[in-house]
């Protein structure tokens, strides 16, 4: 059995590096998405039976039906209560009162998530092409024993990521739950539920206003 050419090892290592970068991009982007929105809601608590949020000072934020979108719900506190609050300088500078945005989309349903998934698929595609070229250039048993398993794993990972991307519709296609239905029951199955230690209920991402 002939030895594996050095170029095969080099290209195989480069393909593995691309696959590792794709995996790392996925993990870091999803983690940043969860941590950012959990930080924004520090101190707020969601009450699913009434579909409202309560701030650390006890003010209730009701859903703003006029501003809510199919995939993003808006909640607003009374402006008068916020203007009298001693924590207002650290909370909001809006004259209309503090608002929260509840993004019902999972990470992969957001534009950022789909962009990162596209990058990951692109890197895996490049890795598969490089491995395929080496299979064609070095069709010897020793080289194939190294290249074919890596090519199969890379292809399987790409198919899995592409399938999950197709299975998750874009956020714009989500249907907003009606105001009369508690969000704890109405949030679509499959969305992320990382709210951080400061909230109860379920949901995905939030931002501060």
Image: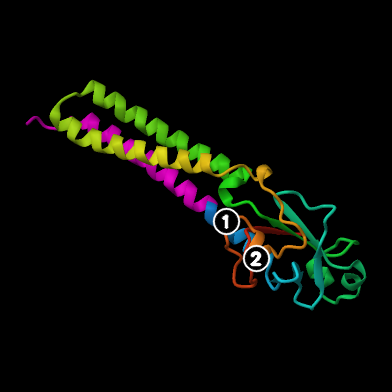
| Sooner in the amino-acid sequence: mark 1 or mark 2 | 2
Location of residue 5 by image quarter: top left
| Pointer 2 residue | 184
Tell whether 91 sits left or right of 131.
Answer: right
Q: Nearer the viewer, residue 57 or 68?
A: 68
Q: Residue 37, relative to residue 161: is it above or below?
A: below
Q: Is residue 130 magenta?
A: no
Q: Residue furthest top?
A: 137
Badge 1 density bin: few <14, some 14–19, many ≥20, Cα 10 Å: few
Give the side of residue 106 with respect to residue 150, left or right. right
Q: Which residue corresponds to the image point at 69% horizontal and 66% vertical from the top-left? A: 41
- Residue 46 placement (x, y as % from top left): 70, 70
Give the structural element (helix, strand or loop) at label 2: helix
Q: Residue at x 15, y 26 (%)?
A: 140
In what element is the residue under mark 1? loop
x and y percentages locating residue 196 in the rendered image: 60, 68
Q: Quadrant of the C terminus?
A: bottom right
Looking at the rendering, the stretch of residues picked out in magenta corresponds to 1-29
Q: Say which residue label 1 marks.
A: 189
Q: How is the protein colored in the picture?
A: rainbow
Position of 162 relative to 47 (above/below)? above
Image quadrant assignment for residue 114: top right
């Amino acid at each position: 059995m002939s030895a594996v050419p050095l170029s095969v090892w080099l290209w195989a290592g480069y393909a593995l590096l691309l696959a590792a970068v794709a995996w790392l991009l996925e993990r870091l982007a999803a983690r940043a998405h969860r941590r950012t929105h959990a930080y924004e809601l520090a101190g707020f608590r969601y009450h699913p039976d009434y579909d409202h949020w309560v701030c650390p000072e006890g003010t209730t934020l009701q859903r703003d039906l006029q501003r809510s979108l199919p995939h993003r719900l808006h909640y607003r506190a009374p402006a008068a209560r916020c203007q009298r609050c001693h924590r207002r300088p650290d909370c909001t500078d809006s004259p209309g009162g503090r608002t929260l945005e509840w993004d019902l989309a999972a990470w992969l349903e957001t534009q950022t998530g789909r962009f990162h998934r596209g990058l990951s698929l692109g890197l895996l595609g490049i890795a598969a092409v490089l491995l395929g070229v080496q299979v064609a250039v070095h069709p010897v048993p020793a080289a194939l024993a190294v290249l074919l398993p890596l090519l199969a794993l890379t292809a399987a990972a790409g198919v899995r990521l592409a399938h999950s991307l197709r299975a998750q519709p874009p956020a714009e296609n989500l249907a907003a739950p009606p105001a009369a239905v508690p969000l704890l029951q109405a949030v679509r199955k499959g969305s992320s539920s990382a709210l951080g230690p400061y909230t109860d209920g379920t949901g995905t991402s939030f931002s501060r206003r």
